[in-house]
Image: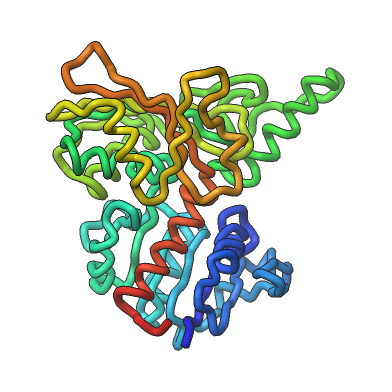
Amino acid sequence: MGYRVVVAGATGNVGREMLNILAERQFPVDEIAALASRRSLGTEVSFGDKTLKTQDLDTFDFTGWDIALFAIGSDATKKYAPISAKAGCVVIDNSSLYRYDPDVPLIVPECNADAIHGYSKKNIIANPNCSTAQMVVALKPLHDRARIKRVVVSTYQSVSGAGKEGMDELWDQTKAVYNPVTDVPPAKFQKQIAFNVIPQIDVFMEDGSTKEEWKMMVETKKILDPSIKVTATCVRVPVFVGHSESINIEFEDHLDEDEARDILREAPGIMVIDKREPGGYVSPIECVGDYATFISRIRQDSTIDNGLNLWCVSDNLRKGAALNAVQIAEVLGREVLKKG
C-alpha cells in the first residue's frame, strides 16, 4: 500500500525535480496530483513514464491525501500549507516560511531524521535553505567525532537558486555579451550576472549580513547544534546549476585530515573525490543530476589548533531542495505513517 502524494508548484524548477525524484527513487505512490497556479493550469509535467496535467492549487481538496510537497514560495505557502495540514495532509515545505518556527522540525535526513516526530504539532515539516542543506551533510559526521566550535563558509551559488528567472537572465546576458546590439540589464539580480560574481543573495540585514548568510547560521544551529558558531559570505556566480562552498571548520578536539577523509567516505549522502593533482576535485558542472554531496580538497588548517578546510559541491535543485524533500517524505513514511 502506497501514499497519495501532492506536488504543489509542479511546473517550477524544484517542483519538476520533485516529480522526477519521486519516480527515480520509486517512492510508493498510489496516486499523485500535480498542482499549479491558475496561470499554469493544464500544463503537462512528467512523472516517470506518465504525463500529468496540473490541477488548480486554489481549489484543490487535500482531504484524504497523505503528503504534500510544497515548492510555491513563502507567500503562497502561508495561504495553502495550513489548509493542507488541517485536512490531514502532511506538508513538506521548501520555502523559508516555517524553518525558524520552533513547532516545525527542520530536517536533513542524514543529520537529524529523529526530529521528524515533531511534525505533529502543525502537520508541517520544513526543508532547509539549499546552501545549508549540503553544508550540514558534510559537517554532521565530523561534528559527531570532534565537536565543531566554529564554521567560516564562503558560498558560490548558482543562478538556479533564484529560479527560472535567474537562469534566463544568465542565459540572455551571456548571449548579449557576444551581440553588442542587445542589452539585457539586470532584473532578477542586483548587477550583471554573466561573467561576473555578486556578493549578495537576498536582502541586507542591520549587521551587514544578507538574509542568506543569516539563514545558514540559524539553520545550522537548529539542525546540528545551537552551540556551533557560523559566519558566512554568500555569493551568486554565473553557473546554471550546482552550489559550491569553501568551508573552514574549527573543532574542539584535534581531527587529522586523513581520519576526516575516512569519516566522510563512510558518511551517508557523501561522495569524497579528493586527489591532490590537477582536476582531482569536483566542480559544480560535474554534480548536476546527482544525489550526492561531493567533498574535495580536505586539508589541515595550520593557522588554528584544530582546523580543517574542505570544498563542498552539490546539485542545489536536488539535495538543496527536491531530493531533501523526498528524503523527508521517505523518513515520514517509514517512521511515522508506515503505509508502504
Residue plotted at (30% across, 74% down): 335
Residue plotted at (34% across, 80% down): 337
The residue closer to the viewer here, 233 or 83, is 233
> Is residue 207 something one can see in this rendering?
no
Name above or below for residue 157 compared with residue 19.
Answer: above
In the image, residue 35 lies at what x, y percent? 59, 71
Image quarter for residue 135? top left
The residue closer to the viewer here, 328 or 56, is 328
Residue plotted at (26% across, 49% down): 223
Name above or below for residue 59 compared with residue 110.
Answer: below
The residue closer to the viewer here, 239 or 190, is 239
- From the viewer's perspective, is 233 left or right of 189? left
In the image, residue 142 lies at what x, y percent? 25, 38
In the image, residue 114 lies at what x, y percent? 24, 63
Specify the quadrant that holds the C terminus: bottom left
> Is residue 134 something one can see in this rendering?
yes
